[in-house]
Amino acid sequence: MATILVVDDAAFMRMRMSKILSEAGYEVIQAENGLDAIDKYRASKPDAVLMDITMPEMDGLTALKEIRAIDPAARIAMVTALGQQQIVLEAVKSGAKDFLVKPAEPDRVLAAVTKLCA
């Protein structure tokens, strides 16, 4: 089964997404900010990434660009709060393949990951 990197500064969101994914059979790696995400991406080359946008240390948009510079084929979906449409548009232009609005329902999380891994 595919490996998914879940990136969010909120521990409860990482745990929620990880639980949804692991129960569906995915292997999950967690990162708490953009810098951590880049390190973990380099180390494990996951099949897909679910990336929060607003985080300390390095935001998701910057991390998206950095990961895509390392691996232009990286498959990343952004996870956003309502009201961040402009950032989502920039993320899509920067290579994001999908986006989820928090709190995403389990079916939507799995649909996004299935799409990313296809």
Image (cartoon, rainbow, N blue to C red):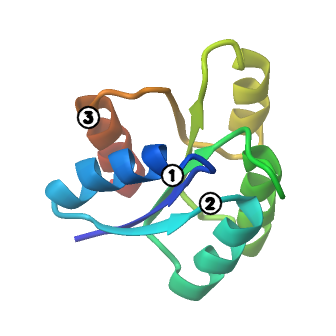
Q: Which of marks 3 and 2 precedes in the sequence?
A: 2
C-alpha gap between disc 3 and disc 1: 17 Å
Residue lying furthest bottom: 43
Residue 30: % across, % down: 49, 66
Residue 113: assigned label: none
Q: Which mark is residue 32?
A: 2
Q: Secondary structure at mark 2?
A: loop
Find residue 2 and report its image quarter: bottom left
Q: Residues within 10 Å of mark 2 (few under 14, many from 20)?
A: many
Q: In terms of sequence position, does the residue under pointer 3 or pointer 1 come before the other?
A: 1
Q: Which residue is mark 3?
A: 106
Q: Secondary structure at mark 1?
A: helix
Label 1 packing within 10 angstroms: few (<14), some (14-19), many (20+): few
Labels 2 and 1 touching (C-beta < 8 A): yes
Residue 67 lies, in percent from the top left, at 72, 65
Look at mark 1 in the image and give the residue it sits on.
11
**Residue 22 versus residue 87 in the image, above or below:** below
Residue 94, percent from left and from top: 77, 44
Q: Amino acid at mark 3?
A: Pro
> Which part of the image, by quadrant, shows the N terminus?
bottom left
